[in-house]
Image: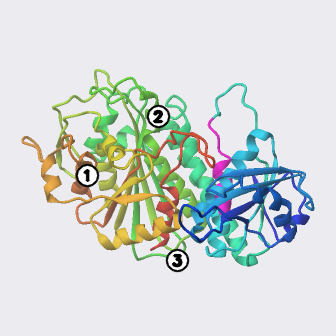
Amino acid sequence: MRTQLSFAKISEIETELLAVVAADTQTAKGPEAKPAPSILAGDAAVVAAAASVLASGEFKAGANETLLIHAPAGLKAKRLLVVGVGKAAKISADGLRQAAGTAVRFGKPRGIKELCFSLPKTAVPDAESARAVVEGALLGDFDADTYRSDRKDKNIESFTLATAELEKSAAEAGLAEGVIFADSQNFARTLVHAPGNKMTPTILAEKAAEMAAEVGLKSEISSTEKIKELKMGAFWSVAQGSAHVEPPALIVLRYEPEGVTDGPVLGLVGKGLTFDSGGISIKPSSDMDKMKSDMAGGAAMLGAMRAIALLKPKVRVIAVVCATENMPDGNAQKPGDVQTAMSGKTIEILNTDAEGRLVLADGISYAKQLGATHLIDAATLTGACVVALGMVTAGSFSNDDATYAKFAKAVEISGEKFWRLPIGDEYAGQIKSDIADIKNTGGRWGGAITAAEFLHVFAEETPWIHLDIAGLALTEDSRPYVAKCASGVAVRSIVEWTRQF
């Protein structure tokens, strides 16, 4: 999708579809209060074009509600699309992001190739609002029909952000950042969306190396020999069940900004299970197809690194993605086995389907060995986190309040939803093993927390954040602003976290 800015009067813009936002300006409360939808545009001709329909009461300006007007009087646009953003007093960057995505999703099935979105002046800072709208448009244009033989290209080809009311330099900066963030998130979504036979550990590593070369990152790709050399026994224990057919990949990317030789080194660690059968503790067949997305944490780190390389923050960053399959065969590890991690810690394997924490354990240790002073990991780690928070909010954990405060600030900017859950000695006690240092599952209760405590064993005192994105890696239902497909969750938040340094 081509993106561009226009500072022209919006009623004078020629386009197939002009989208404007409307808010409910009603401030009264109570059963008698009715919505008062109002077009947010400084152009009187646009307001007049929709006045009669808005007066009818059929459009309430609810979030992502749409109203289409053909051949709007007084406008050069062929169609006028009014998109609701809810209460005027509560307009947010994420509300604008969703509105832009809604406009794109509305136009795509109707064969619209050219869309102009009018962004009004709101309480959201100019650059932030422009960035959010561009993100929403590009993310909304992503679809899941990649492998259909009868696929019809219904993408929006041209997206114009009309910003007559915004400061020009802020709008330009916002658009440029929005393109980087959205393209990087869509890169991650493309990786997650691919089926297991099209996104093996080897292919994932190739995609990572290609991306790194394009944006100027250093990359190092290795496999079985290096994993064994590093004594990554936890990682290898997961990989050994299919290594003879689909060998694992250890992916390392480095961002080293010019002139920065000291200060923190951020370590981004991602779970890269390109397919997870559960191993010997095999999963039920229902929904196992979704386990192609078990590498969403690794994909998020690769997408984040792409954005970091293009945004060029003044901080050094290392990404480590441990990519493998988890399959059952005669070589696979068994429940009851004891494995030795890279750190030297021994792990009793009670459940081979609790494998994500094993690859992350060695990934965390390796990131520390490479010099990381602060860590963040992301993984589709536990169903328990989905039970706790549903498919709306992801879980987050940390051993350091100052480091987490930076992440909380990052989430405010990204618009993604994370909720901090506790860790502590009481939970850590649940993963103590009778025959090894720790065991890889702490039982039914507090499963997301005990999984985090397992990782805490390897992070040790290094400031660390763990993101459990199991419920959000795939969008289960199509929404007005995004298709039912891979979400790319956490990319924006991880990038914003790095920028806090």
Q: Residues within 10 Å of mark 1 (few under 14, many from 20)?
A: many
The percent position of residue 335, horizontal first and vertical second, equals 19, 30
Determine which residue is flagged by label 3. Answer: 259
State the residue at coordinates (36%, 40%): 225
Is 367 drawn above or below residue 235 in the view shown? below
Q: Secondary structure at mark 2?
A: helix
Give the distance between the C-alpha atoms of the residues marked 2 and 3, in whole angstroms. Answer: 40 Å
Report if the CB atoms under discs 3 and 1 are less than 8 Å apart.
no
The percent position of residue 81, horizontal first and vertical second, equals 77, 54
Q: What amino acid is labelled 2 in the image? A: Lys
Determine which residue is flagged by label 2. Answer: 292
Report if the CB atoms under discs 2 and 3 are less than 8 Å apart.
no
Q: Is 142 colored magenta in this rendering?
A: yes
Is 476 drawn above or below residue 1 in the view shown? above
Over which residues does the magenta segment extend?
133-144
Name the image quarter holding residue 439. top left
Instruction: Please indicate, yes or no, whether residue 371 appears anywhere in the rendered image.
Output: no
What is the chief secondary structure element of the magenta stretch?
Answer: helix
Q: Nearer the viewer, residue 183 or 47?
A: 47
Q: Earlier in the sequence, mark 2 or mark 1?
A: 2
- Horizontal side of residue 105 vs 249, given as left or right: right
The percent position of residue 259, horizontal first and vertical second, equals 52, 77
Determine which residue is flagged by label 1. Answer: 449
Q: Secondary structure at mark 1?
A: helix
The percent position of residue 419, horizontal first and vertical second, equals 37, 59
Q: Nearer the viewer, residue 269 or 392?
A: 392
Pick the quarter of the image with the C terminus. bottom left
State the residue at coordinates (69%, 46%): 105
Give the distance between the C-alpha atoms of the residues marked 2 and 1, in whole angstroms. Answer: 24 Å
Q: Mark 3 against mark 1, which lies toward the viewer?
A: 1
